[in-house]
Image (tube, rainbow, N blue to C red):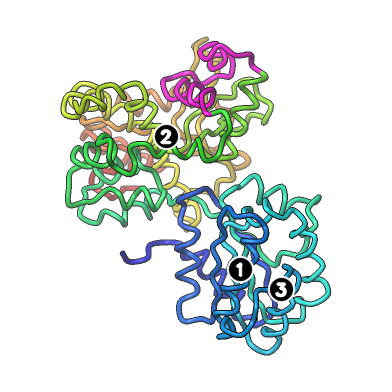
Amino acid sequence: MKFIGRDYELNSLERLYAEDSFQFVVMYGRRRVGKTRLLSEFCKGKDAIFFVAEEYNDKMALEKFSRKILEYYGMSEFMPAFDSWEKAFLFLDKQAQSKQTILIIDEFPYIVAANNSIPSLLQNVIDHNLKSSKLFMVVCGSSMSFMEKEILSYKSPLYGRRTAQMKIEPFDFFDSAKFFPRYSVEDKVAAYGIVGGIPQYLLKFSDDFSIEENIKSSILDKSSYLHDEPSILLKQELRQPALYNSIIEAIATGSSKLNEIATKVGEDNSKCSNYIKSLMELQIVEKEIPVGEKESSRKTLYSIKDSLFRFWYRFVFNNIGLIEQEMIEYMYENKIKPELNDFLGSTFEKVCIEDLKRRNKSMELPFVFEKIGRWWGNNPYTKREEEIDILAVARNSALICECKWRNQPTDIKVVNSLIEKSNMLKYENKYYMFFAKSGFTQDVLRFSKDNERIMLVDFGMGNSRT
């Protein structure tokens, strides 16, 4: 399939490559996010040694690394494997003194797990040898906590040696949508809400089939790749998946505060907090605080960040029995279809935030916002809890947004309600944006035409009136 997205990352790598000098790039991101494919795309047409580490002991890992290097230089038939990692890197240093060469070490944490002295050894070789070479070295890893703590942190021997670092994030909606050029906007949002922005997951859906057909064949079918993917990923990354399963399910089914989650799973708050932290490091769960609140806010909520996990724990985890009985049609019609539109409501809010970030970058909004997210809290005028779908702010300016994922046009009541709620926000300049799946009533169109502070985005049509 044609390579999609990652323009920023590719341009950054190409810019470093053009310097024709030693580079030490640290790249990391969660599993399946497309790091290897990105690096393969970058290496096209260039002299590159691409080594993918596996879970071997130190001796076997060194032998495989040696073989990859010697095969690249045509020396494998008459040179034995290097007897130390240091000699392997010194050999590369000598070869790259006059000729630029790319060395990719994918899944670098596996090598360090087998030999924890490698970061110190590599630090020494970089400082005394490689700095003067033309080696373009990239160490890549899926264990984000390892890469951040053992490679990038102040305590790491390799601290300060990197020439660049790249955290590879899942695609946003707009790049994810490129996988489905024949889908309607509504179906693109649905696909994004179900599998998210992970390239390997997106490839399992096809716009040759409907969203319903994709769900049935690619998730509910027990032989499909995505059917057990969340469970497999947890077992790969975590030692005690049982409690993690319970925490994720609690969040996916509506428990969003720490005490609610702890009560639901029957554990104390501190234990749950530690487990949630691990899930956040894996980018499965995220913490939310209202825009403008401090990090320590008591209003903190937790939600499922990974779309496939959110879908799987909402619809699949508790219905495994039906899947085992191969009752796929029954499960879709009775468990998924009635709730799917509601499920996609929060996905639509996420899509709208991503749309606003793009507009902000291209300076299309009334002001450049510095913070964006949801807002919730007590309304001092009505004495009740209020929620605002999206609030984007900068100094004395606020963009206040409502997102409506429903089959009816957004009416004037929605507009008036948001304007009324905004009275509790103490910003000097207030602007309003309304995102709608099914367009707007004539009353809303007329009202917005006469009010330059109101902007409408009709997502169903893929366009906007601002």
Residue on which the image places disc 1: 65
Q: In the image, is 209 to the left or to the right of 398?
A: left
Q: Nearer the viewer, residue 99 or 57?
A: 57
Residue bounds of the magenta highlight: 241-269
**Residue sitting at x 77%, y 71%:** 126
Label 3 crowd (10 A; few <14 / some 14-19 / many >=20): many
Residue type at mark 3: give it. Phe
In this view, 356 is above or below 37: above
Q: Position of residue 411 (x, y in %)?
A: 26, 28
Disc 3 to disc 2, C-alpha distance: 40 Å
Residue 131 left/right relative to 458: right
Name the residue that disc number 3 marks: 89
Q: Secondary structure at mark 2?
A: helix
- Disc 3 is placed on an element classified as helix
- Which one is in front in this view, the residue at disc 2 or the one at disc 1? 1
The quadrant the N terminus occupies is bottom left
Residue identifier under label 2 = 309
Left or right side of 326 for 268: right
Q: Nearer the viewer, residue 207 or 362?
A: 207
Query: Pointer 2: residues within 10 angstroms few (<14), some, or many (20+)?
Result: many
| Marks 3 and 1 close (CB-CB < 8 Å) | no
N-term-proximal mark, 3 vs 2: 3
Q: What distance separates the C-alpha of mark 3 from that of mark 1?
A: 10 Å
Q: Single out the residue that lies furthest toward the bottom.
A: 98
Which of 354/367 is in front? 354
